[in-house]
Each structure stands twice: as C-alpha cells, then as structure tokens.
Amino acid sequence: MDEAAFDDFYTGSFRRLCGQLHAMIGNAEEAADCVQEAFVRAWDHRAELDRDAHPEAWVRTTAHRLAVSRWRRVQRSLRPPDRSHGPSRTGTPPGPDRVAVIEALKQLPESQRRTLVLHHVCDLSVADVARELGVPEGTVKARLSRGRTALAALLDPAADDVFDARGPEGASRA
C-alpha cells in the first residue's frame, strides 16, 4: 500500500475503528489511543498491507491487543489512577441508548462481547469473525446466541431477576 492509499485507508476507517474498539473495551479515550497506535504500527508495515488482505481487520486486531496489554499493565501496577489526567470530552456525548448498550456489553464475558461487536458493530460475517478470532464458526454462532440472550436480559428494564451472562449452566463454554 503506498502513502496515498494508506492516507485514504486511515481517513476512511479511523473513526469507525475507534467506535468498534470503544464498544469492545468500554473506554472511548483508550480506544482512540489504541487505534492510533495500531495505525502507527500499520504505517511501519504498509508495504505488506494490501486492501484485499483486510487491513482494517489487522488494525482492529492490533488495537484490541494493545488495549488488552494496557489493561494488564494497569492491573499489575495496583496503583490508584492518576487523577490529574481527567477524561477529556470532545464532540457530543453518546446518547442514553448507546451508553446502556456499552454498559451491558461490559457485563458480558470478553469472548461474547468481542464476538458481538465484530459481528454487529463491525458488520463482519460469521466466517470473517471466526477467521479474525481464530475459532470455529460454530463457536462464533454459540457466542452470538448467548451474547444476544444476555444483552436482551440486561437491556430489558422489566426483567425481574438478574441474568447470569454465562448461560443457564452458569459457565460459558464459548
């Protein structure tokens, strides 16, 4: 991919990837940082990136891995957060429906949350999600089914009892 094609790729997919990663990890600022870092790494590999080889999936996967690595570092440090770096607000705040969906997604197991976001937010087919996650298509279908059921219960204000997102058996196999 040459520089002009990379610029077009960046311009056309940065905001979408930030939104997708935000839905996966629940933090908009962290998502934007990770996507930006993933694009820096993609720039270094732009000679190998080809539009037909799904560079957006490469950047999304790299950004997600960066987010997971950052989360692990924070968990290991066990220090209180630095309050001098408050959240910065840019643009319009998300609506209440979006906030509710992201809060509900946070309550799901990571594997279900990531599968749901890739399929419904990133608009990837089941086969594409399976390929990106490195799991069989049946596993993707099971995670989608369990995740949708859990989300429905979490988003339904009329639900009487607390829903265990791990399913009726109490443990997620997917």
Image (tube, rainbow, N blue to C red):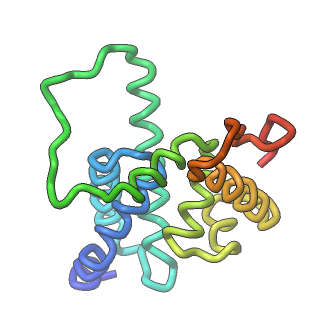
Q: Residue furthest right?
A: 169
The residue that appears at 23% across and 55% down in the rendered structure is 93
The residue that appears at 27% across and 73% down in the rendered structure is 10
Image quarter for residue 81? top left
In the picture, the quarter occupied by the N terminus is bottom left
Q: Is residue 51 above or below residue 32?
A: below
Q: Is residue 48 above or below residue 141?
A: below
Which of 114/5 is in front? 114
User: Residue 26: percent from the left, percent from the top?
Assistant: 41, 46
Task: Please give left or right for residue 8 compared with residue 97 in the image.
Answer: left
Task: Please give left or right for residue 66 compared with residue 162 in the image.
Answer: left
Task: Please give left or right for residue 8 compared with residue 111 in the image.
Answer: left
User: Residue 11: percent from the left, percent from the top?
Assistant: 24, 76
- Mark count: 0
Which of 15/69 is in front? 15
Q: Is residue 45 above or below residue 172?
A: below
The residue that appears at 50% across and 68% down in the rendered structure is 121
The residue that appears at 19% across and 60% down in the rendered structure is 92
Task: Please give left or right for residue 41 compared with residue 66 in the image.
Answer: left
Which of 53/113 is in front? 113
Image quarter for residue 140? bottom right
Image quarter for residue 129? bottom right
Which of 17/42 is in front? 17
